Amino acid sequence: MDSPTNRMNVVGVLMLRDPVDFARLGRLLEERFLVHDRFRQRSVESFWQLGLPRWVEHEAFRLEEHLHRARLPLPGDERALQRFVSAVMSAPLDRSRPLWEFHYVENFGSGAAIVARLHHCIGDGVALVRLLLSLAEPSPNGTTALAPPIPKAVGKPIGPAGYVRALGSAAATLGKLAFMSFDPHTRLKGRLGVEKLVTWSHPIPLDDVRRAGKALASTVNDVLLTAVAGALHRYLSRHHAVTTGMDVRAVVPVNLRGDDDPATLGNRFGLVFLPLPVGPAGAVERLRELKRRMDRIKRSAEAMVVFTLLRVFGATSGLVEAGVVRLLAKKATAVMTNVPGPREHLYLCGSRIDDVVFWVPQSGRLSLGVSIFSYVGRVRIGIAADRGLVSDPDQIVADFHDALAELAGAAV
């Protein structure tokens, strides 16, 4: 699924309050990261992608080829870090080595930052973010890795009954996917380039979002997703004729691990196609419509059915799967994730992690990635976009803040 215009990498950013010792960081990776075989292995493709790839031990593995030091141009602020992350996200990983790397940015503000890039074939977003946070500790002097809880799946727990429900509604879901129309052509759709642009919002107090949701009989997730829809309405209205009732779909990965599942790598996620109401509408009207759609998806087996389809096509060949992915991508505009993170501050090599941002890749021909991540009572939205189509992702972030403020005002 890799392509020059959409690298299949999960990218995470940890913002540290203080610099850390680079050698100590290397030892931490050796102790807690390299115990997983996947990080010492590389992927070998079959001839012409006609068979399945396989993992092989990388005999020439050297940690220094995967852990790098970097410095930002002055003043070393968030804007400089965003440009650095954009460059990292745009570049390919070296296929002759294990598919991951860490960049220690030693002069971000008065502290530092860690930019991690890990290929999706090693694990999905939930698995890799969980693994990344497992490097941290619950106190500055702690020596035990913290295992953050696995985010709960959308919908009911998966088990034997879940598979029965999935089979029972498989025909309807397959029909929905097969006959789903292509997304409308907007500024967000078009020929992709190699360069990506990354930005993120200011931290937003989660209690403010929770109060708005309670007043409007909605969940925190409903409010945040509605704010994203409102932001896209504002953004597209400046560049495109947005009609009444217009939708653009977001592909939403759904974690299918149970609460008691171990912290394993690999991919265990489904996908749902969420139509975002971006046509003209009031804030409350938009919220109610999005909530209605999201509630319907939660009651369906769409995520499990798509997970099964991905497994079936993934067992054929890369050429077949790539074709299916391209077809599904025509039916959507963006990838959107919402992952709840730890509620207490974590520490890495003794330095407090002040904030976390991450993105999953925009597979197929999707130009826009939207990431929502909560941490210690605050939430950030991150935007990753194709530079040729969205040259001003900061504007989408500003529109998100405006849309969220409108919802908060309606809740008063």
Image (tube, rainbow, N blue to C red):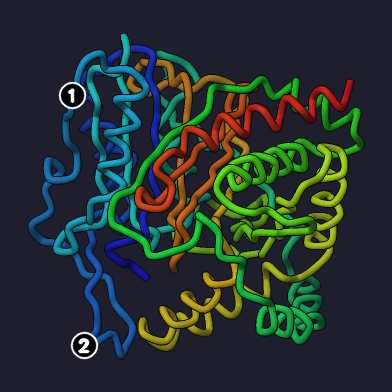
The kind of residue tagged 2 is Phe
What residue do we see at 60% from left, 60% from top? 251
Residue at point 60% right, 55% down? 261
Q: From the viewer's perspective, is 314 left or right of 80?
A: right
Q: Locate the N terminus by quadrant.
A: bottom left
Categorize mark 2 by other alpha carbons within 10 Å: few (<14), some (14-19), many (20+).
Answer: few
- For discs 1 and 2, the disc positioned in front in the rendered view: 1
Say which amino acid is labelled 1: Arg
Compared with residue 310, is residue 109 higher up or lower down, i.e. above or below? above
In the image, 244 versus 76, the foreground residue is 244
In the rendering, which numbered label is found on residue 47? 2
Side (left or right) of 103 relative to 248 = left
Which residue is depicted at the point 39% across and 23% down? 15
Instruction: Tell which circle, 1 or 2, labels the residue nearer the N-terminal end.
Output: 2
* Vertical placement of residue 45 versus 407, above or below: below
For the residues labelled 1 and 2, the Cα–Cα distance comes to 40 Å
> Which residue in the structure is indicated by mark 1?
71
SS class, disc 2: helix
Give how far across and how far down residue 2 sits, in percent: 33, 67
Residue 225 placement, left or right of 124: right
Asked which quadrant contains residue 101, the reply is top left
Occupied quadrant, residue 94: bottom left
Query: At x 54% / y 37%, what residue is drawn?
Result: 396
